[in-house]
């Protein structure tokens, strides 16, 4: 399928803001892929699909996750903001017949990151953080660091996310902690 065909698939599943975000992530992912030597087409596809289930109600997301035989951790069960990445990875396999493990994992871990991320996974993680419409505090710093290296951008992005969660006394994803630790150990 082409990016235009994928846009046609995701458009009815999301509102204008989420759709614009998905298009922007796809564009940024392709740009980062070109910069860092990854497959630009795969990056664009993973970017356009990364939030495919974000606006589906939580009950339906849990059904999708269950249909993929995924068992959520206690933290994942208690953090419904993480479900769309997990349900999205199942949805693109079952409904769109995507079999490329790298695209599936890029969708699955775009929110938390994880240890041993592929180049494409890092690109989608950062493209989601830094897409054109993003305007949260420190987004420009993350963009600058992503231009230096994917790891620098990810490290700052994960620090930013974890510090916000700690301030709110939110649950921390073990995948995010593992990604953070791996980058720190390899600096």
Image (cartoon, rainbow, N blue to C red):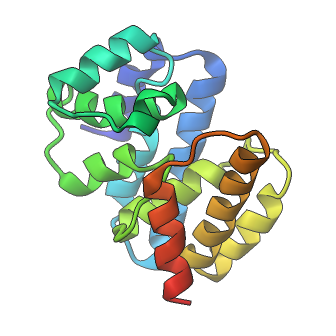
The percent position of residue 74, horizontal first and vertical second, equals 39, 35
State the residue in front, 159 or 10: 159
Question: Which residue appears at 43% of the width and 56% of the height?
Answer: 175
Rendered image quadrant of residue 40: bottom left
Rendered image quadrant of residue 1: top left
The percent position of residue 115, horizontal first and vertical second, equals 38, 67
The correct choice, above or below, for 48 with respect to 77 in the image is below
The percent position of residue 135, horizontal first and vertical second, equals 81, 45
Rendered image quadrant of residue 142: bottom right
Question: Which residue appears at 46% of the width and 77% of the height?
Answer: 182
Please indicate whether residue 81 sits to the left or right of residue 163 in the image.
left
Question: Which residue appears at 13% of the width and 45% of the height?
Answer: 99
Figure quadrant of the C terminus: bottom right
Please indicate whether residue 87 sits to the left or right of residue 174 in the image.
left
- Residue 147 shows in the view: yes
- Residue 132 shows in the view: no
The percent position of residue 92, horizontal first and vertical second, equals 25, 32
């Amino acid at each position: 399928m082409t990016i235009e065909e994928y846009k046609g698939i995701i458009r009815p599943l999301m509102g204008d803001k989420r759709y614009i975000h998905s298009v922007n992530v796809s564009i940024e992912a392709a740009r980062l892929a070109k910069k860092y030597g990854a497959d630009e087409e795969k990056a664009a596809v993973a970017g356009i699909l990364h939030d495919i289930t974000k606006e589906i109600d939580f009950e339906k997301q849990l059904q999708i996750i269950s249909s993929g035989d995924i068992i959520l951790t206690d933290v994942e069960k208690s953090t419904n903001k993480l479900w769309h990445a997990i349900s999205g990875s199942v949805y693109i396999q079952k409904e769109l017949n995507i079999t490329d493990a790298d695209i599936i994992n890029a969708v699955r871990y775009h929110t938390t990151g994880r240890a041993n991320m592929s180049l494409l996974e890092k690109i989608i993680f950062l493209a989601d953080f830094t897409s054109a419409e993003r305007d949260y505090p420190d987004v420009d710093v993350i963009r600058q660091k992503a231009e230096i290296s994917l790891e620098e951008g990810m490290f700052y992005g994960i620090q930013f996310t974890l510090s916000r969660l700690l301030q709110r006394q939110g649950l921390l994803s073990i995948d995010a902690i593992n990604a953070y630790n791996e980058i720190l150990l390899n600096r």
